[in-house]
Amino acid sequence: MSDLIEAHNLCKTFTTSVGDVHAVKGLSLTVRSGEVFGLLGANGAGKTTTLRMILGLMKPTSGSASVAGFDVASQPEHVKRSVALVSASAGLYQWLSSRELMHYFADLYDVPLAQAHRRVDQLAELFDLHSFLDRPCAGLSTGQQQRVNLARSLMHDPPVVLMDEPTRGLDIVGSKRIFDFTARLKEIGKAVIFCTHRLEEAQRLCDRFGLMFRGRLQLEGTLPELRQKSGRESITDIFLDLMDEHNSTTEESMQPRLVAAIPAQEGTST
């Protein structure tokens, strides 16, 4: 298996009116073909910012990344052609039918027409779209729109799939469809980053895990490796221990500053 996603010491700092915000701090990772890598963390941990840098939508403050052998900074068009992004926030063009939408995305990626027709048939079979393939997207249910969204992301058959909170807002049936989809991607040799704060879901799906906290990749490895490092069984418990450890360290480091900031009472010395 080859490394299809590589990130080396990625950093991203945002300058705001109240000072610099360090969203991602020195993140490095690799993902091989046929592997699902779980990028896990609470909201605000830096997961989506990391995906945007890997995809080339956001320039890193420092560090580098490559996708399918293409450098994100110098070959952004090649990178985008090598990636499918599946996100809960992605919408559909409501006035297009599912078939028209899929052909539209095929055209964006310069997929030849004959090949696009074959891909539509293959993906319609895979995601059971035939009964509403020619119906406008505006008339589809949430579950049907979700299936069309998954299908259109694969129209150009990319080697890499980035999934950003794909089960957000879905019921148990919709979530299972995402699980089945991810398992299928692994079977056909895609490299997948599954980005979520739902740790139990990730434990079911992923081969390796990267636990992000406050912009850093704090722990990385397979589940047996993380269990050995932490002495815990579940990803949830491992992550909660990680948070408690860092919160405790932060509180201890703040104590001397807090004590120094308290004015001495009259008649006493510090």
Image (cartoon, helix red, strand yellow):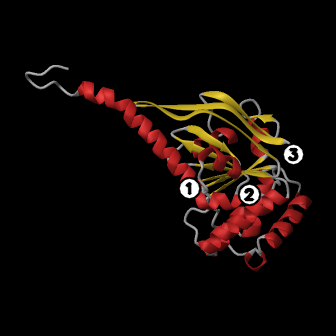
Numbered disc in front, either 3 or 1? 1
As measured in the structure, the alpha-carbon distance from the residue carrying label 1 to the one carrying label 2 is 30 Å
**Quarter of the figure that contains the C terminus:** top left
Q: Badge 2 is on which residue?
A: 153
Mark 3: amino acid: Met
Numbered disc in front, either 2 or 3? 3
Horizontal and vertical percent position of residue 202: 64, 57
Numbered disc in front, either 1 or 2? 1
Rendered image: mark on residue 236: 1
**Residue at left offset 16%, top offset 19%:** 269
Horizontal and vertical percent position of residue 226: 65, 47
**Quarter of the figure that contains the N terminus:** top right
Crowd band around label 1 with a 10 angstrom C-alpha radius: few (<14), some (14–19), many (20+): some
Mark 1: amino acid: Thr
Q: Badge 3 is on which residue?
A: 1
Using the image, determine if residue 200 lies above or below residue 54.
below
Q: Quadrant of residue 25?
A: top right
Q: Earlier in the sequence, mark 1 or mark 2?
A: 2
- Closest to the observer: 244 or 89? 244
**Secondary structure under the numbered disc 1 in the rendered image:** helix
- Closest to the observer: 241 or 160? 241
**Residue at left offset 12%, top offset 26%:** 265
Q: Quadrant of residue 125?
A: bottom right
Q: Quadrant of residue 201?
A: bottom right
Do residues under tags 1 and 2 come within 8 Å of each other at their CB atoms? Answer: no
